[in-house]
Image: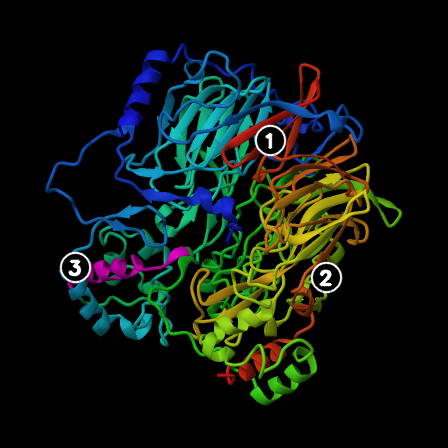
Amino acid sequence: MIRKSILFAASLLLSPVLLLGQGNGLANGDLLKPLKDSWPTYNGDYTGKRYSSLTQVDRTTVKQLTLGWMSKLNAGVDAPALTGNGQRGGAARDAVRSIIGGEGAGDISVRGGSIKGSVLQVDGTLYVTMPDNAWAIDARDGHPLWHYFWKTRGGTHIGNRGFGMWKGYLYMETPDDYLVSLDAKTGKERWHKTIADLDQGYFATPAPIVVGNHVLVGVGNDIDSPGFLQSFDPETGELQWKHYTVPMQKGDPGESSWASLDAARHGGAQTWISGAYDPETNLYIFGTGNPTPAYTTGTRGDKDNLFTCSLVAVNVDTGKMAWYYQTSPHDMHDYDSAQTPVLVDGMFKGKMRKMVLTAARNGYFFTLDRVTGEHLVTSKYGLTTNWAKGLNAAGGPDHDPSKDATVGGSLVSPNSSGTVNWQPPAFSPQTGLLYVYEANSFSLFYLTDLDPRGSMGLGGKEEVQIGSAGSYLTAIDYKTGKAAWRHRYFAGGGGGAGGGVLATAGGLVFSGDGLGSLVAHDAATGKPLWNTRIGQVTNAPQTYMLDGHQYVVCATGDMLWSFLLY
Amino acid sequence: MRVKTGFLATATVGLLMSSMYLALAQRPAPAGTAEPERVGGFVPGQKRAPIDPVLAAHGKALYGVNCQACHGKDLRGGDMGGPNLLRSQVTLTDQNGELIVPIIQGSRQALGMPAIGISIEDSNAVAAYVRSVIATIGAQGTPPGKQEPPSIVVGNATDGRTYFASTCAKCHSAEGDLRGIASRIVDPKQLQATWLMGGGRSGISNGAVSKVSVLLPSGATSEGDLVRMDDFLVTLKSGDGTTRSFRRNGDLPKVTLTDPLKAHKDMLSVYTDKNIHDVTAYLVTLK
């Protein structure tokens, strides 16, 4: 406590003028451009490809990639200055006063924190978040411009996927269910709005996606509650529409896929990963989470439980659903299908098609027509995936009831974390390949709650992890669903590799390897070309151009690393 | 919707009720005024209004008389169709009876919930009881209370013995290494996991460590226990206890790994669940 007070005093004395973010924010249309110089939205652009058209760093020059700076981000109120970014006059120079917001009493200490989302880069400033914390950072040397701290009321603090941006304004979600808008230059709060009810178990991790004059906001929940996606006005924060992902009223689409309306209204389908946007159709396409109760059929019945574990396309102006495709009908293993959808234009059976790809947590890969939702390809990319009997008439996996949690234990692959979890994939138009993690783990699923009503939330089962048949970075051909290559990571256990994937026009794929290295792979073959041993990478690497240099940034926990070519 | 919690993930979750005063929020609590605070069970860190235990006890008795038939003894829904009150948006949101009491008083008769005919005070007591049970919901919405899980030994020991003889007996024997295994590992659930993995959860029992051999350009070979390996380095521990690392460049130097548990790992895709249950049923007899 004493130390804290001293630091606080020091920051009062030494903190110089208020530092400001640089530039003029986003112009209209910036978000529609292919990903190149900046990184203005969660996936870089709306397509979800995480494919940069930058070529300065390529298969040859990547070997000269070198550290520009690193910064440690300290969460909390008036935390110590960021450190490690050089000796330019010591910590005093880097001290910034925290801007305080939030509805909490300030008596909940959220210790630590980890960067598990995207960093925005606009006009030479980086905008980065952890749960309850946000920073603007000078992209050239890593020193902080402002820090914003949110006093929480509680909630699940598992991660924050980053900011959305509109003009000079930023938007982030908080674990206690608020949408907070900040002024990008100063970090000062403009407003915050309630997006869900904490008492009902909702929490919020996604990065808001800004489309036109809409801020699209998803939520998470583990107790039996309905999922929804909401749209807010970027200027005022007023709610524009709310789209439920399960039937809420008699006669709603999908009602007959539940045993009762009450079951549907508690059916889950949370919206906890940001989606992709197609400007031609004005559709926002996102994945939905598992049904609840997750591990027991009970009151939800044995049908499909729509629209859980689905890709859902909604009109951005109205929130009305245009189509859906269920990638895990009647899920029984907490295999959310929230994974990032990837929009691809390309040849399919001799014709140009507008498609959406998704590699789901359940071990299956899908190619769909993104205008209509028409099913094109299903493949089982998880080498040991064993919970389905085959495919149903719609091309979705046909769940095998004998692989549900049982009293004696059923040995299931993948484990409930999935072949991939939240980690974003990448797609390169040069290779036509989707790059995604494939963790071939095994767990025993025991049914522990034999109540015929089913259990609640994620309860009623015990999961015992047994091992892994290998963890891979896998490159999937969207035309066939087959793996063009698999690169094995040596990380053991059930986990995948780092925090997601980046593809570049330099013919590279960047990812953490789960063993403490950031790695650049040859996008065509998977061969590792370069690595740097910086620790476990916790987000998907990103790239941008600044002052004529291509940068590659990523995070390891609370450390932000910036590499570049000189 | 559980997000993968690797060690990095868990490191970020540390949401702790802390008595540490934050620099800007320094408000020492006056002595002797500590209120009982209810920490919302399944909502980490959340504080909700305290519940008077006497009121909740009274409510529990009233619940048994008036509510239990429809909503179940455990509030999770009953035979007569009353919904689960532990996941109801009304009961989860109720702070002080303001949402529950009107419903008990008859505001939802059109939806099939009758007016119960108890006083406002008694309705408040029932609401307090419902909230007190909600406070015991576990993490990620798991139901309150600990149930005794059923025995996981569901297989056929005779079939398990046959399967063991044909598959496992190449390396193991009931009279040899597995003699008394069920006395050493008395929990069948632990036994089942252990034999599937080929070792304890910590995994690194003697004999279960991967061996690695590195063929150096000089033609010499360096051998030892595998410490770690990735695409760029392999680290081994030699017999004399020293640790050595070798840089890897593609296939050079040649690295040969010998995983003593490979057979166990390979079998994971081969067993049926019946095989697993039968073998466990057999192994629990090896006391």
* Residue A354 visible from this viewpoint: no
Q: Amino acid at mark 2?
A: Gly
Residue with the mark numbered 2: A395
* Residue B177 visible from this viewpoint: yes
- Is B136 magenta? The answer is yes
CA distance for labels 3 and 1: 50 Å
The boundaries of the magenta stretch are B119-139
Secondary structure beneath dot 3 equals helix
Asked if residue B180 lies left or right of residue B100, the reply is right
Q: Chain of mark 1?
A: A
Residues at marks 2 and 3 on the same chain: no
Image location of residue A317, percent across then percent down: 58, 37
Q: Amino acid at mark 1?
A: Thr
Asked if residue B125 lies left or right of residue A117, the reply is left
Foreground disc of the pair 2, 3: 3
Closer to the N terminus: mark 1 or mark 2? 1
The vertical placement of B206 against A542, above or below, is: below
Q: Residue furthest right?
A: A350
Secondary structure beneath dot 1 equals loop
What is the crowding at mark 1: few (fewer than 14 residues within 10 Å), some, or many (at least 20)?
Answer: many
Secondary structure beneath dot 2 equals loop
x 52%, y 60%: residue: B202
Q: Amino acid at mark 3?
A: Pro
x 20%, y 51%: residue: B50
Residue with the mark numbered 3: B53
Q: Residue furthest top?
A: A17
The vertical placement of A280 against B164, above or below, is: above
The vertical placement of B216 against A122, above or below, is: below
Magenta-drawn stretch, dominant element (helix, strand or loop): helix
Residue with the mark numbered 1: A41
